[in-house]
Image: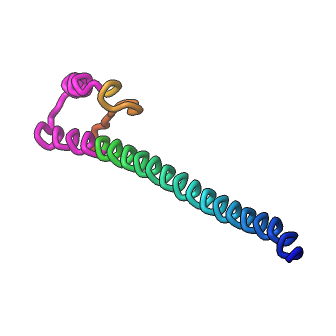
Amino acid sequence: MSWKRNFTPFLLSGLILLLTLVAQSFTRTSMALHTEARFEAVADTIRDSVAERLRNYQNLLLETRGLFHAAPSLSRDQFHTYVADLRLLEVYPGMRGIGFSRRLRPA
């Protein structure tokens, strides 16, 4: 009987240690999954934001192309007025400007 009495504290200590290790492993896995999910959410938000900004820039360029198709003899002043009305700095952050060059035919 005395060996059981002497063995019980070791058994309980081992069981508590095992439960502690299991809880620690669960916590580590749970935190890793949570961190990964947060990272994925932030990455998705950034990806969507960049994609939307690029779509906006592309649409702006397509609109400008449409302007030249609608008014092929557009003057420089008319084009500057168009670009000023776009409010590029306000509406399209990061865009520096839009320009165009007339194609000259050799004489």
Q: Is residue 34 left or right of residue 97?
A: right
Q: Position of residue 20 (x, y in %)?
A: 70, 60
**Quarter that holds the C terminus:** top left
Quarter-of-image position of residue 64: top left
Instruction: Say which of 40 and 51 sits in front.
Output: 40
- The residue at 26%/39% (across/down) is 60
Q: Is residue 30 left or right of residue 44?
A: right
Indicate yes or no whether the magenta region holds residue 2: no
Q: Tell me the chief SS of the magenta region.
A: helix
Q: Which residues are magenta?
A: 58-87
Count of number-bearing discs:
0
- The residue at 14%/43% (across/down) is 69
Q: Position of residue 102 (x, y in %)?
A: 28, 38
Q: Is residue 105 left or right of residue 35?
A: left
Any part of residue 107 in sight: no
Instruction: Say which of 56 and 97 sits in front.
Output: 56
Indicate whether 98 appears above or below 62.
Answer: above
Q: Position of residue 22 (x, y in %)?
A: 66, 65
Q: Position of residue 76 (x, y in %)?
A: 24, 26
- Give the residue at the far left of this rendering: 70
- The residue at 83%/75% (across/down) is 4
Indicate whether 49 appears above or below 4.
Answer: above
Any part of residue 94 in sight: yes
Tell me how the rendering is colored. rainbow
- The residue at 68%/64% (across/down) is 19
Indicate yes or no whether the magenta region holds residue 84: yes
